[in-house]
Amino acid sequence: MNLTSLAAFEVRLDPVLDLGDSHLGRRRVINIVGGTFEGPRLSGVVLPGGADWQVLHPDGTASIDTRSTLRTHDGAHLYLSTNGIRHGSPEVIRRLNAGDPVDPAAYYFRLFCRFETGDERYRWLNRTLAVASAARTASTVRYEAYALD
């Protein structure tokens, strides 16, 4: 198995909407307002309208569940869903939640990425699993996505 670079993503986010504690944990929704992606196999823009339907667990782990729509540089539309986890020390998580800058090496933030499209030029993505290493800032998520070949 090999990892092949797909693209670097920068996703711009609205402020966190905190829905409070449920039986699963603290539910948060973070709306996606736009962004870009650039790489050897994919490039374009992240369209507004997606979100991360996140759950914070008592141990500080965040379960990530995003859905977004992408438009490639050549006009194709792609659906992207990511699922993953983010965790770190209580101090690091407190700083991330406050929007403070935190070195991505200080916490674990990994994603599974699945694409879907009807555009013939990108149908190969429908049969491709990808993984990503991510970093959170006050208003963005940045990640490098790699296809599992």
Image (cartoon, grey):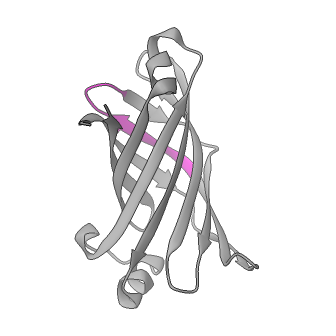
Q: Quadrant of the C terminus?
A: top left
The residue under the point 58% across, 41% down is 68
**Vertical placement of residue 6 versus 60, above or below:** above
Q: Quadrant of the N terminus?
A: top left
Tell whether 61 sits left or right of 92.
right
Q: Is residue 147 visible?
A: yes
Q: Quadrant of residue 39?
A: top left
The residue under the point 54% across, 27% down is 78
The residue under the point 36% across, 28% down is 43
Along the viewing direction, whichever of 82 and 28 lies nearer the viewer:
82
Q: Is residue 40 magenta?
A: yes
Where residue 35 sits: x, y (%)?
Answer: 45, 43
- Extent of the magenta region: 32-42
Q: Residue furthest front?
A: 1
Tell whether 14 sits left or right of 17.
left
Q: Residue furthest top?
A: 120
**Vertical placement of residue 58 versus 144, above or below:** below
